[in-house]
Amino acid sequence: MIRETGQIDGYDYGSAKIARSPVTLNELQELKVTLRWSEEDERFLRLAGEVLQDQTEPLVDLWRKQIIASIPHLARHSRAPEGQALPDYVTRSSRRFQQWVLDTCLQPYDQDWLNYQHEIALRHMAPKKNQVDHVRSTLYVPFRDILAFVPVMNETIKPFLAAKGHSAQDVNAMHRAWIKSMQLQMALWAKPYSEPPAGYSHW
């Protein structure tokens, strides 16, 4: 089930609070053509969402509490500048991370989805990072770290896609659709990251 806005702290999907993306729907369609996005990809991505529905918490825990937490230059983005843990911040942002998994698989890739892609990217950048949860942490997450972590997510999600007993062919199709979506989302995130606030790079 796709949760409604307001049930998760800071989850504003489809809300009037979210600005319109500078990327047009036509540009989104061009990106999908470049990716060779198909109706089959959409079908298997929805299937992936059904498979992952009750697995988002352990999946995000794997990514954040086991992998990211073990890499200091990544873990610092969920900590105070002095290095102290921010458990409430991790809890709230992890719930949004879980919802992002479901949105990736189950939401239509329409204007609301496009707008929220832009919003998520901005929330990893200065000055929006830390604002939603009113915390003190790093000013931004470098795009290089986000992009480099995508293959890790792609690799580690496959056992979760296989957890419900689907055929190897269907698991591969779900996995292929997920990877295409990751590539699409990173292409969209690249726009705000290529136009950071004046004064410093977000690379």
Image (cartoon, rainbow, N blue to C red):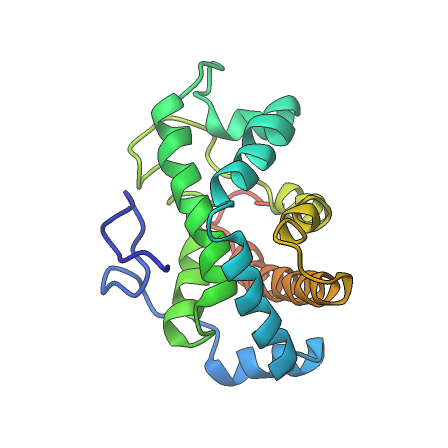
Is residue 135 depicted above or below 144 in this figure? above
Q: Is residue 89 left or right of residue 202?
A: left
Asked if one can make out residue 21 in the rendered structure from this viewpoint, the answer is no
Asked if one can make out residue 146 in the rendered structure from this viewpoint, the answer is yes
Image point 69% across, 43% down: which residue? Answer: 156
Residue 38 picture location, percent across and down:
65, 82
Image point 32% across, 65% down: which residue? Answer: 19
Image point 37% across, 45% down: which residue? Answer: 128
Of the 4 image quadrants, the one containing the C terminus is top right
Depth check: give the residue in front, 49 or 143.
49
Residue 196 picture location, percent across and down:
51, 52
Residue 96 picture location, percent across and down:
40, 45
Is residue 113 depicted above or below 195 in this figure? below
Is residue 33 depicted above or below 186 in this figure? below
Depth check: give the residue in front, 106 or 83.
106
Of the 4 image quadrants, the one containing the N terminus is bottom left
Depth check: give the residue in front, 188 or 36.
36
Q: Is residue 174 left or right of residue 189?
A: right
Tell how many labels: 0
Please tell me in which quadrant of the rendered image residue 129 appears: top left
Name the residue furthest front: 165
Image point 43% across, 27% down: which residue? Answer: 137
Residue 152 picture location, percent across and down:
71, 43
